[in-house]
Image: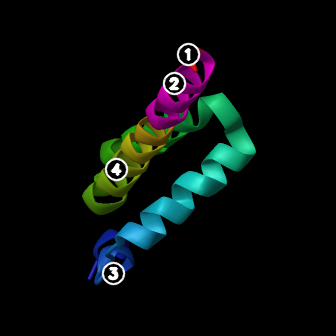
Amino acid sequence: MNRQTRANSGLTFGKDELGAMALVLEGRHGCHAADVAEFFSTTHLQGADQRRGTAWARVADIVRERTARRLADEIRQAAD
């Protein structure tokens, strides 16, 4: 069994784990969090690590969704 297969066996990421990953990135990288997650995704996908690459792409999406919600809330509050 090669190392890549063994490292990925049984690797799954739940919604809570992906959300936690997004929170950590937002805390450490602020407005660059989605870009950092995209970088991780691309790096893993280029290294033939489909599961981790997909997980990081989902984290990037979560960060972007949270950012959009925060901005929408700020706009709504400014309008009131």
> Which mark is first along the chain, 2 or 4?
4
* For residue 24, side relative to residue 2 (left or right): right
Tell which of 41 and 6 is nearer to you: 41
* For residue 50, side relative to residue 41 (left or right): left
Q: Are marks 2 and 1 in contact (CB under 8 Å)?
A: yes
Report how far apart the C-alphas of labels 3 and 2 lie in the structure: 49 Å
Q: Are marks 1 and 4 in contact (CB under 8 Å)?
A: no
Residue ID for mark 1 = 79
Neighbourhood count class around disc 1 (C-alpha, 10 Å): few under 14, some 14–19, many 20 upward: few
Please report the bounds of the magenta region as a residue range: 67-78
Neighbourhood count class around disc 3 (C-alpha, 10 Å): few under 14, some 14–19, many 20 upward: few
Q: Secondary structure at mark 2?
A: helix
Locate residue 24, reporting x and y percent.
Answer: 65, 56
Q: Are marks 4 and 2 in contact (CB under 8 Å)?
A: no
Q: Are marks 3 and 1 in contact (CB under 8 Å)?
A: no
Residue 6 numbered tag: 3
Q: Image height check: is 57 above or below 30?
A: below
Residue 63 numbered tag: none
Q: Residue at x 44, y 62 (%)?
A: 18
Amino acid at dot 4? Arg
Q: Residue at x 58, y 38 (%)?
A: 33
Q: Residue at x 58, y 21 (%)?
A: 80
Q: Image height check: is 20 above or below 63?
A: below
Residue ID for mark 4 = 58
Residue ID for mark 2 = 76
Q: Secondary structure at mark 3?
A: helix
Amino acid at dot 2? Arg
Tell which of 52 and 14 is nearer to you: 14
Q: Secondary structure at mark 1?
A: helix
